[in-house]
Amino acid sequence: MTVRDRFRAVFNFEMDKVDRMPMVEWAAWWDVTIRRWEDEGFPKLDWEGSLSYFGLEPLVMLFSGPGGPGLPKPAYHGAGIIKDEEGYERILPYLYTDQAIENVRTGALALKERHERGEIIVRLWLDGFFWWPRGLLGIENHLYAFYDQPELIHRINRDLCEFNKKVADVALNILTPDMAGIAEDMSYNHGPMLSRELFDEFLAPYYKEVVPLIRAKGVPVLVDTDGLLHDMIPWLMGVGVEGVYPLERQSGVDVAWIRETYPKFLMLGGFDKIVMNKGEEAIRAEFERLLPVMKKGGFVPSVDHQTPPGVSFEDYKTYARLLAEYAKKACQK
């Protein structure tokens, strides 16, 4: 089977058709992690070469964000670049540009042949309707803006919605991605960062415009949201979203509970990165925790966020070796 065939079969719950699970890193390694490994003997390789070294398969992101060259940078992480509608007006020349759409076209064409041969898995990335306004307004101001500047939140999300529809249209007329991921990061270790009422008012209308366009092409739509996301799953399902990632164990996410409660909900990630430097026994125990869910399909295991620099080169080789072992175990009758 090809790399792409395995991924699509697992996401279609067709476990009887696969010889083993896909072996992917949806978001591989921090740069500081790679530098540590190179000091410990890891050869200097490009991204795909690094994946191949560990026996992993390329899950490639197709992306061109709504912010273009010239867009001001925030003063620090979590700060905004605008405060109000006047500020939004000032930066509009740098947003939602024709060049950004052309970048999507160029990127899709560059991936098309390899994708059709099944050599790569393609993830279409879209900025989400919580993520993007937060990046513009900053973390604190964004949360206040739901109450203090609701018209601005809607204006930003209407503009983003039109941009995302153009991105999807261009990409989907060139190739059929194996999944679409909408970036949100709208939950933390105690649950969602917004209420159901705010989700329904400020995000849901735009999801309902974008998601059907993607699903009509047979592409599953997942949301990338960190933290504890259990309460949010019905919200997402209500707007057509079919799955979530990265399923961070440290925040309390339980993939077994998700599979039992939502039998056809798709999942990507889930492997607890916190155990990766605790030795083979701990890594194996984590795979044993995930194995029953892996066997049911609809779940592609991967580190539940980027592998941190506390994980040594030897630690990661152990993880990759056991991933290969359990990728086969999951498909054994």
Image: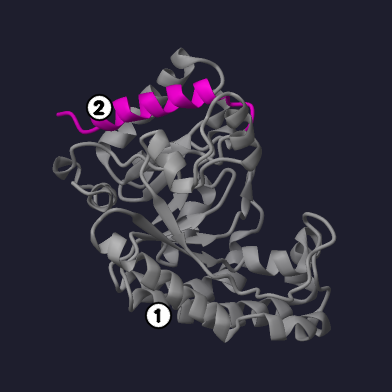
Over which residues does the magenta segment extend? 309-333
Tell me where residue 240 appears, x and y as whole percent: 40, 66
Query: Dividing the picture into quarters, in which one does residue 65 lie?
Result: bottom right
Residue 223 visible in the shown view = yes
Q: Main secondary structure of the magenta part?
A: helix
Vertically, is 104 above or below 273? below
Please state which amino acid type lies under the numbered disc 1: Asp
- In depth, the one of 321 and 15 nearer the eye is 321
Please state which amino acid type lies under the numbered disc 2: Lys
Vertically, is 47 above or below 79? above
Vertically, is 27 above or below 235? above
Location of mark 2 (residue): 329
Tell me where residue 102 appears, x and y as whole percent: 49, 80
Disc on res. 169 = 1
First in residue order: circle 1 vs circle 2:
1
Instruction: Report the quarter where the C terminus lies.
Output: top left
- In depth, the one of 194 and 13 nearer the eye is 13
Residue 331 part of the magenta segment: yes
At horizontal 56% and vertical 40% (from top left) the residue drawn is 29
Residue 63 part of the magenta segment: no
Instruction: Decide: few, some or many residues near mark 1? Use Cα within 10 Å; few <14, some 14-19, many ≥20.
Output: some
Query: Dividing the picture into quarters, in which one does residue 156 lie?
Result: bottom right
Question: CB atoms at circles 1 and 2 under 8 Å apart?
Answer: no
Question: Residue furthest toward the front?
Answer: 44
Kind of element beneath mark 2: helix
Tell me where residue 40 appears, x and y as whole percent: 58, 23
Disc on res. 113 = none
